[in-house]
Image (cartoon, rainbow, N blue to C red):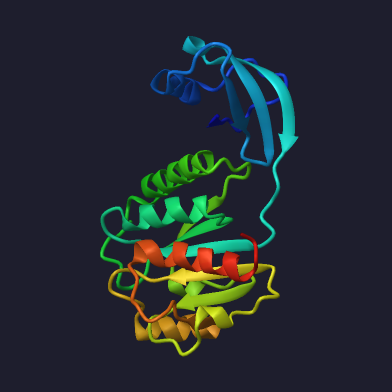
Amino acid sequence: MHWFFDPQFTADSVALRAEEAQHFKSLRIRAGEEIAVTNGGGVVYLCKAQDPAQGKVSVESTRLGQRPKVDIQLVQAIAKGDRDELAIQASIELGCSSIVAWQAEHSVSRWDGKEQRNLDRWRQIAISAMKQSQQAFLPEVSGPIATKDLSPVGHGVLLLPDAKQSLSQIDMSAARYSIVVGPEGGVSDAEIEQLFDAGFAPYRLGDSVLRTSTAGPAAIAAIKTLRSLW
């Protein structure tokens, strides 16, 4: 079943917003086909396509999605190419609750003067990942934020390849986690000190050094596994 996102959709709606209606053609949705529409706030509407060319549907039933039992925030350093975007896509599919863009000292890519455009791009990726993974809640995407303004939401996790603590030693009783992932050039000594002072604790992911695109998703998967959520 294909999923669509329309924040204004209600049980009385008869058509999807124009942006989503355009996807009917690319997905070759046919009249009578069942689809799901979420408003991103936890409500899922199970519908039947009535006029695919116009994006018209009929609501057959409604259900409420379940919020994740553990809230995981990803603080992702802005990275070159599409590495940060790959991290966002995978992290949301894995159940990340929110994303914060971090303009780290060693970030090769800079958002200077292009903050809103890049933030909008990350938000579109979040929508795509939510629909792909058939989730009912759209993760919040915010930033960019400077190191001095970062503070943990719940248990703070700073991923460092040389940390003494393994992620398997993390506090298993926390209801929320904030995971900080550095850029390609790593986290500077000054940033590490600032993040420690803010309340983040250092953890390593095994013995290998992961890319900025894979470290966050790997940590999320590890926490959910350790917490027996999978």
In the rendered image, which quarter contains the C terminus? bottom right
Q: Residue at x 56, y 51 (%)?
A: 140
Q: Quadrant of residue 120?
A: top left
For this view, does 194 lie left or right of residue 95?
left
Location of residue 81 with respect to 154 vertically, above or below: above
Choose between 84 and 225: the one closer to the eye: 225
Closer to the camera in the image, 56 or 31? 31
At which x and y percent is residue 18? Answer: 49, 21
Asked if 224 appears above or below 36 in the picture, the reply is: below
- From this view, report whether residue 112 is shown above or below residue 55: below
Q: Nearer the viewer, residue 136 or 133?
A: 133
Decide if residue 225 is on the left or right side of residue 19: right
Whether residue 145 is visible, yes or no, is no
In this rendering, would 92 be left or right of 15?
left
Q: Left of 81 or right of it: where is 221? A: right
List x then y, in percent, for residue 133: 53, 44
Where residue 130 sits in the image (x, y, percent)?
Answer: 53, 43
Residue at 64% from the left image edge and 71% from the top image edge = 154
Quadrant (top left, top right, bottom left, bottom right) of the N terminus:
top right
Rendered residue at 53%/68% (across/down): 222
Q: Position of residue 184 (x, y in %)?
A: 29, 69
Reply above or below: 212 against 11.
below
**Viewer can see residue 70:** yes
Find residue 175 and report its image quarter: bottom right
- Number of numbered discs overlaid on the protein picture: 0
